Amino acid sequence: RRRRALPPARRARIAVVGCGGWAQGWHLPNISNRPDAQLVALVDPADDPGAGGCLHGRVESMSDLAARYGVPRYKTLQALLEERRDELDGVLVAAPHGHHCSLGLAVLEAGLHLLLEKPMCADVGEARALAAAAAASPPPLGEERPCSLPPPHCSLPPPHCSLPPPSGPPALAEE
């Protein structure tokens, strides 16, 4: 599938897959506070995602997260894509890295933009498969930044929060 260009005034509609410590402490606050992005769904098979990442034990349940961000929660990426694919522009994958390849391939095959949390995948073969799929996909919406928000919105201390905010996603050409 080919992605169409985003209208200039519309925010990028993003789903997050994998809602543990990194997503809760980093990605969700940053996406929800960006003027050029809109969080539209959460995906995690666990009702209580694992701690770790930036939170170390302070994770919220999926029902609490969905209520806090005012978005629906899905147990699988497949369920999200079947129900709301046309309402998405991209997916951020913050699931355990052993799942990155299969999730990333599904996102790219759906014609959506993809951001994978590091590490990219579990082995070189998976990396090659993702690279090939990405090469046949649309250009990215923008670049990942360590953090674009000043404290207290960013969960990391300075200097990580001292970067200026990005200017917004580049315009995407019609294909």
Image (cartoon, grey):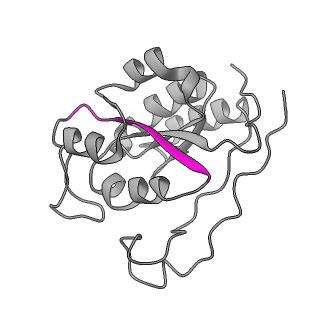
Residue 145 horizontal side relative to residue 76, left or right: right
Please count the marks in the image. Answer: 0
Which of the 4 image quarters holds residue 137? Answer: top right
- Tell which of 35 and 118 is nearer to you: 35
Q: Residue 24 location in percent, x, y?
A: 31, 55
Which quadrant, please, contains the N terminus?
top right
Which of the 4 image quarters holds residue 26? Answer: bottom left
Q: Is residue 25 magenta?
A: no
Q: Residue 6 location in percent, x, y?
A: 73, 37
Residue 79 horizontal side relative to residue 15, left or right: left
Please, is residue 85 above or below residue 93 in the view? above
- Tell which of 4 and 66 is nearer to you: 66
Q: Residue furthest bottom?
A: 159
Residue 70 visible in image: yes
Please identify the dominant SS of the magenta region.
Answer: strand
Which quadrant, please, contains the C terminus?
top right
Residue 118 visible in image: no
Give the residue drawn at x 72%, y 45%. 9
Q: Is residue 38 magenta?
A: yes
Magenta region = 36-46
Give the residue drawn at x 67%, y 52%. 142
Q: Residue 149 location in percent, x, y?
A: 50, 71
Give the residue drawn at x 52%, y 68%. 146
